[in-house]
Image: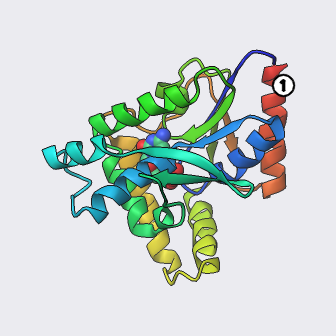
Amino acid sequence: MSKPYIVAIDGPAGAGKSTLAKQLAKALDIAYIDTGAMYRACALYAIESGINPKIDSPKLRELLDTAEIDFRPVGDEQHIFLNDVDVSREIREPHISTGASDISALPFVRDLLVTMQRNMAKGKSVLMDGRDIGTNVFPHADVKIYLTADVKERANRRYLELQAKGDSSTYETVLEEMISRDEQDKNRAYAPLKQAEDAKLIDTTKLSLEESFEALYQYTREVLQ
Ligand code: DC
């Protein structure tokens, strides 16, 4: 496609979204924006500042008004910066996952980040992943994919990922946290996680990473042709 286009990938935590989205953006040679990282950065900022990310307080509004969030290339990766500090590692901590889900239910936070996301995509092709990209951020995206997998499989993947990083969380804790985050993301009143009517459903429960990538890549090529 010669004119700029948008690829939207949504789905619950642990379906392989960010790994696959990163690979797909690279294969298509377009920019990748991990919107979950933006909600995580806001949660980190709130928590570090001693503000409860669940409550829409004047203090939280004031704080987020001063938040500068941007993505910058570091080596061959994209890192997220909060007020000029690389927070890519800190935002992956389990308590930040919960904080991000909490803060993402607040309409003013979503409005703030959705505006940033639309601006980031101006005039160029991007692949964005999150929970509401195909339904809310870019309802007219050229390609929409809803990536999912069985919750036990998703929890197992996340558990193995955390173990590899030396985190001591048990499988049961990871599963519980995932179920409650899914519930919260699907049931919030404002822009909840749901499959857009025109999104292609890809279930990765029984697929390897390579097979999942192939399914995403084939579908995207087909639509963009
Ligand atoms: O994709 P992730 O696990 O990094 O996202 C963290 C949280 O951020 C997730 O539980 C819900 C929220 N989120 C959202 O509400 N909308 C998005 N577009 C992306 C993430």
Q: Residue at 42% across / 48% down in the picture? A: 39
Residue 132 visible in image: yes
**Side of 78 where 91 appears, left or right:** left
Which image quarter holds the N terminus?
Answer: top right
* Residue 145 visible to an observer of this rendering: no
Q: Where is residue 68 drawn, in percent x and y?
A: 41, 44
Disc 1 designates what residue? 222
Residue drawn at (35%, 31%), measured in percent from left and top?
111
Where is residue 95, by image quadrant? bottom left
Badge 1 marks a residue whose secondary structure is helix
What amino acid is found at the position of numbered circle 1 in the picture? Glu
Q: Residue furthest front?
A: 84
Q: Position of residue 55 (x, y in %)?
A: 19, 50
In the image shown, does 143 or 207 lie closer to the viewer? 143
Query: Left or right: where does residue 58 sit relative to residue 101?
Result: left
Q: Which quarter shows the C terminus?
A: top right
| Figure quadrant of residue 61 | top left
